[in-house]
Amino acid sequence: MSITGVPQGGSKTFEADALLNSVLDAAGFPAGSVDTWTSDDAAEVTIGPDSGPDVNEAGSLDQVLISVAAGAVGTAGAGNPASFNLSVSVQMPAPAGGSAPAPLVATANIPILPPVVQVPTAVVINQVD
């Protein structure tokens, strides 16, 4: 799924997916892998606890809930669209008798969208006098 952004004052879930030869690996990361999520805008972006990767299976592992403060402008700088950078580092365990490989690292620029406007879903008639 492509990255569409997070609205000001809202939250969205992001996921780290394992690739094998540039193709999505349904097996996921090896058991014992540890992922670390960071943002370059700690003042306006909150990263919730992550759900893995700690087992070798696909599903809701390797996900974090990212929340953006109301009125957030991000780190893109004045005159640029509001955004922040989200990074994940995945450290896989060492194979038996070997040493741990270098961590896999990815960074994505995440747009900060205008706040979601609540739209009425019903109407009611009241007498006022």
Image (cartoon, helix red, strand yellow):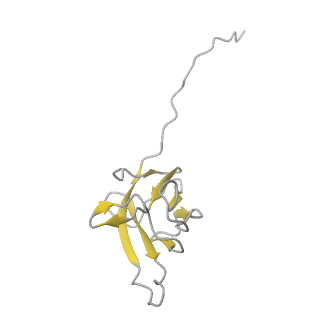
Q: Position of residue 91 (x, y in %)?
A: 46, 78
At a point 55% along the width and 68% down the height, the residue shown is: 54
Image quarter of residue 75: bottom left
In this view, 92 is above or below 97: above
- Foreground residue, 119 or 37? 37
Whether residue 77 is visible, yes or no, is: no
Residue found at the far front of this picture: 96
At a point 52% along the width and 70% down the height, the residue shown is: 42
- Foreground residue, 114 or 2? 2
Q: Position of residue 45 (x, y in %)?
A: 51, 63
Left or right of 38: which side holds 107? left
Q: Position of residue 8 (x, y in %)?
A: 48, 51
Quadrant containing the C terminus in the rendered view? top right
Q: Position of residue 94 (x, y in %)?
A: 47, 84
Residue found at the far left of this picture: 22
Q: How many marks?
A: 0
Left or right of 108: which side holds 29? right
In this view, 8 is above or below 100: above
At a point 42% along the width and 47% down the height, the residue shown is: 114
Left or right of 19: which side holds 98? right
Whether residue 15 is visible, yes or no, is: yes
